Amino acid sequence: MKQKPILYWAAIILPFIFTRCAKEETKPQQLLTNGNFENGNTVPTDWGYITEKEIYSGEWSDIEFVSPSKSAKISSSKSDTSAFCFWYQTINDNLPFGKDVTLKIKIKGNMVGKGISIAIRTDDTTMPSGTAEQFITTENLSPMTGSFDWSERIITLANVKPTSKSITVYFIYLPNTTGEVYFDNASLTY
Ligand SMILES: [Ca+2]
């Protein structure tokens, strides 16, 4: 049998290689670490919790979760007219300048009042400081309150400024809220 010339095989194989490379390039790049809240010792690694008042409680929960056994929880039995609290993560490495970043998070809630929002901000400092360079929140777009099972919420911040030194994501428990909420499977991709 006559051997096929090498170009014959190249014509068959190369398109597969190129298709594969193109797919790899379009795969979303993940900026968050420990997005499933599974890693940590007493608190989830890479995540912070800040509250303006002790009436709120931020916990690493093993009661409710989407991915294997943990989530981030906020709860309160008392509401406040101005104080809020939040889970957050700040990213300093490999910032995607000029690109849009999309925050996705699974949320389960049983709340009364204003409820929660999710937000993204960029700063020209390595930690959030003063006024944000860029900021987007679901607060006035799409309220999330009441009682609901695990559902995904998404928000996109367009065109990360090239002067950015940090991107921070927030899961915020708003003023005038009581009840409990769980966050799991966070991702920030571009
Ligand atoms: Ca989890």
Image (cartoon, rainbow, N blue to C red):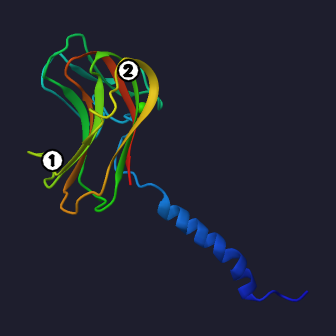
Q: Amino acid at mark 1?
A: Ala
Q: Label 2's element?
A: strand
Relative to 99, is 35 above or below?
above
Outermost residue to the front: 141
Q: Which quarter of the frame holds ligand 1?
A: top left
Relative to 42, is 135 above or below?
below
Q: Label 1's element?
A: loop
Point out residue 97 in the picture as x, y percentages from the top left corner: 28, 62
* Residue at (25, 30) in percent of width and height: 172
Tell me if mark 1 has few (under 14), some (14-19) or many (20+) residues whose alpha carbon lies within 10 angstroms of its own.
some
Q: Amino acid at mark 2?
A: Gly
* Residue at (21, 17) in percent of width and height: 176
Outermost residue to the top: 77
Relative to 160, is 104 above or below?
above
Residue at image mark 1: 132
Point out residue 23 in the picture as x, y percentages from the top left corner: 54, 62
Number of numbered callouts drawn: 2
Quadrant assignment for the C terminus = bottom left
Tell me if mark 2 has few (under 14), some (14-19) or many (20+) residues whose alpha carbon lies within 10 angstroms of its own.
many
- Residue 117 sits in quarter: top left
